[in-house]
Image (cartoon, rainbow, N blue to C red):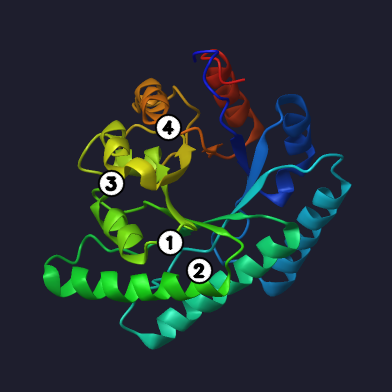
Amino acid sequence: MDGNLPKRPVFISATAQDLDWVSELVDKYSVGVEITDFAQSTETPDSRERTFELWHLWREAATEKVPMALHAPFLDLVPGSLEPEVVELSRKQHKDALNLAGILGVQRVIFHSGYNPLILGPQYFGPWLTKTGRYFTQLISEHPGFIFLIENMWEPSVDPLIALVDRINSPNLRVCFDAGHACVWGKEPPEEWLPKIGMRLGHVHLNDNDGTWDQERPLGAGVIQHEKILALMNIMGFFGPMTIEMRGQVAIQASIDYLSRRGFF
């Protein structure tokens, strides 16, 4: 990386079970943390409360203000569903996540759009865009202190997210580009998504895979052209946060080493 370019913030994904080694990496590399415990709402209420307590204690004990993000629940949630009960479940889970984020002092919260690419035709896309746009517009207006980030998951292209972000048209809403998801489910190589996202880009998730499923391997251990992605981010003038998104200290350390060799630390 060109030494004259700004250093972009780097986050590592983690759960409360990882806090021992997370603290080591935070102190050593000055990275931020993206909390992923609440991304899938499978824990019992008691375990969620205990997880939150662990993060809260860790945050309070930190000698410096560690930059943090939080991944909101997404599995089985469809904000633009035609079923009111599904929408209300999504709203409850998302509001709970925003409340936790607020108490922890987390500003950046990552969501998914619930877009289903298997349903073809305008009879799906139009209503999905209208209802999902209305959903996030309301959520953003009710929680103005957060940066909302919509991450690509099963979208075959970035077009649905571009349409959604442009429909809502809020300065508090941006796209979270996930290179691994784009590699597995996208019809175009991940690096071709970035120029289309353009100024809508607010966060980047980096991991690797072999193109068959979302393996979340260390950077350089799959087929994703990360050097092209990083170069494009520089060309676009995007120096916002990126998360090394994978599980385990070994994988994250290998990815930090990958970025270090390219001047990112």
Badge number at residue 185: 3
| Comes first in the chain, label 1 or label 4 | 1
Q: Which amino acid does label 1 sit on?
A: Ser
Q: Earlier in the sequence, mark 2 or mark 4?
A: 2
- Image quadrant assignment for residue 117: bottom left
Q: Nearer the viewer, residue 97 or 147?
A: 147
Left or right side of 38 for 65: right
Query: Mark on residue 208?
Result: 4
Q: Which amino acid does label 2 sit on?
A: Ile
Q: What element carries label 1?
A: loop
**Contact? badges 2 and 1 (CB < 8 Å):** yes
Mark 4 residue type: Asp
On the image, the x and y values in percent for residue 48 come to 70, 66
Image quarter hosting the C terminus: top right
Relative to 197, is 12 on the left or the right?
right
Circles 2, 4 touching at the beta carbon (< 8 Å): no
Closer to viewer: mark 2 or mark 1:
1
Gap in Å between the C-alphas at discs 2 and 4? 31 Å
Task: Calculate the distance from the C-alpha at mark 1 to the C-alpha at mark 3.
Answer: 27 Å
The local secondary structure at tag 3 comes to helix
Image mark for residue 170 = 1
* Pointers 3 and 2 in contact (C-beta within 8 Å): no
Residue 80 visible, this angle = no
Relative vertical location of residue 244 with respect to residue 96 in this rendering, above or below = above
Spot occupied by residue 155 in the image (x, y as percentages of width and height): 28, 53
Alpha carbons under labels 1 and 4: distance apart:
31 Å
Say which residue label 2 marks.
140
Classify 10 Å Cα crowding around label 1: few (below 14), some (14-19), many (20 and above). Answer: some
Q: Given this view, does label 1 or label 3 mark the residue nearer the observer?
A: 1
Q: How crowded is mark 2: few (under 14 residues within 10 Å), some or many (20 or more)?
A: some
Discs 1/4, front: 1
